[in-house]
Amino acid sequence: MIYTSCILLLAGCKTTQKTTSSTSQDSKYTEDLSVWRPKAEPATATSVTTPTTTGTTPEDRKTQPYTEARFAINRQLDTVLDSIDQTNRSRRYIDGFTIQVYSGRREEALNAKKQLATSLPRLESEVQFTEPIFRVKVGKYYSRMEAQQDYTAVKRYFPAAILIPEKISLNE
């Protein structure tokens, strides 16, 4: 064991020999790969005018007569769709988003609503009161992506505006 480790240690300490590199023109690496390049065949007049790839032309295709499905699931599918429809009709709210412009005292909330109406007249805003805070909210959006464009416009005038999730009434 000791003998082999000494041999490995001495072999590892051996001085390295200097390698020489030749810079002459004869030692540069060259290889001709042109034999491996794909060769393009010149286009002929017949190949340009007949672009058939499958070997069939529209005249060769035969029209199939209409066949009614034998294993239709229409009755089962109709009952499922009816139950989904009933569930959707019973829903009064849907999850969505709104932009909260201000939250605080009543006078400042009314001022924020007035400023919003003059700055962005196309957006409808409303003041909501949940004791003890007045909130000014803008828009009703079904997805965050819908709300993002108006949110960036509101952010210019109201830097403290935030995008919040809210239940949107479907009766309106």
Image: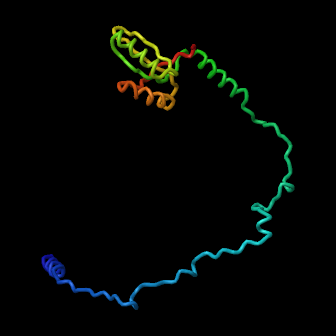
Which sits in the foreground, 93 or 105? Answer: 105
Residue at point 85%, 46% (across, down): 64
* Viewer-side residue, 10 vs 151: 151
> Which quadrant holds residue 13?
bottom left
Work out whether 59 lies above or below 141. below
Residue at image point 15% right, 78% down: 9
Q: Residue at x 13, y 79 (%)?
A: 6
Q: Is residue 4 left or right of residue 25?
A: left
- Whether 41 is drawn above or below 22: the answer is above
List x then y, in percent, for residue 126: 46, 14
Q: Nearer the viewer, residue 83 or 53?
A: 53
Q: Nearer the viewer, residue 111 or 67?
A: 111
- Which residue is outermost to the front? 118
Q: State the image coordinates of residue 114 (x, y, percent, origin top left).
A: 43, 15
| Location of residue 70 in the rendering, given as x and y in whole percent from the top left corner | 79, 36
Marks counted in the figure total 0
In the drawing, does residue 96 fall left or right of residue 83? left
Quadrant (top left, top right, bottom left, bottom right) of the N terminus: bottom left
